[in-house]
Amino acid sequence: MVDQGSDHGMTWLVYALLTVASWGVYGVFLHTGQTGMADPVNGRYKAFLFVGIAYFLTAVLAPLAVLIANGASWSYPLKGMGWSLLAGTVGAIGAFGVLLAFGAKGTPPVVMSIVFAGAPIVNALVSLGMHPPKGGWSSLRWQFVVGILLAAVGGCLVTLYKPPPAPAAHVQGTPMTATAQGTAR
C-alpha cells in the first residue's frame, strides 16, 4: 500500500495531477449527469444523490479495504475525526453548490473556472490564517500575492467574457419548444 514515511521524490506531483484531471472533468460530467436525468426540476438533486453513492463507494469502501489490508489501528482521535468530517461536509456543500449553479443557468466552463480560480484564493487565505507563515504575513513573497491577485482577475475575466451559449437545438428543422429546451439543458 502507500508508504507515507519514505521519500517518493515527485510522486506527490503525480497524485496532484490525478486530482487536477479528476476535478477538471468533474463539472462537465456532473452537468451531463444532471441533464441526463431528464428532469428540469429535480435533475440536480438526482445527480447529487449519485454523487453521494459514488462518494460512498470511493471514499468509504475503498479506504475501509485499504485500512483492513494494512492492519490499521481502529483508534480515531476526536480532532482528526472532527476536521475530516468538516472537510467532507464542505466538499459536499461545494458539489451541491456547483449543481445549484448549473440549475441557475451557469455553464460548466464558467462555473468551474470561477470555482477553480476562487478556491485557491480561499485556500491560501484560510491556510495562512490557520497556519501563519514563519515571520508573519509580512514575510509573504510578492510573487505569492501577485498569484492570488491573478487568480482573482482570471475568475473575473472568465465571468465577464464567457463564451456565448450554444445555438438552440432544432428538431427536424424546427426550433424546440420551451418545455423541450428546459429538459435538454
Image (cartoon, rainbow, N blue to C red):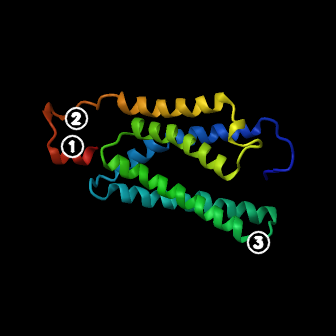
> In the rendered structure, are the residues bearing label 1 and label 3 in contact, judged by CB atoms less than 8 Å apart?
no
The answer for how far apart the CA atoms under marks 3 and 2 are is 55 Å
Of the image marks 1 and 3, the number of the one nearer the N terminus = 3
Question: Circle 2 sits in a helix, a strand or a loop, which is it?
Answer: loop
Residue at image position (64%, 37%) is: 17
Rendering coords of residue 103 (x, y %)? 32, 50
Residue bearing the label numbered 1: 181
Residue bearing the label numbered 2: 169
Rendering coords of residue 27 (x, y %)? 45, 43
Residue 162 visible here: no
Question: Circle 3 sits in a helix, a strand or a loop, which is it?
Answer: loop
The answer for how far apart the CA atoms under marks 1 and 3 are is 52 Å
Question: Circle 1 sits in a helix, a strand or a loop, which is it?
Answer: helix
> In the rendered structure, are the residues bearing label 2 and label 1 in contact, judged by CB atoms less than 8 Å apart?
yes
Question: Label 3 sits on what residue type?
Answer: Trp
Observer-side mark, 3 or 2, equals: 3
Residue at image position (47%, 30%) is: 153
Left or right, residue 41 beside residue 4: left
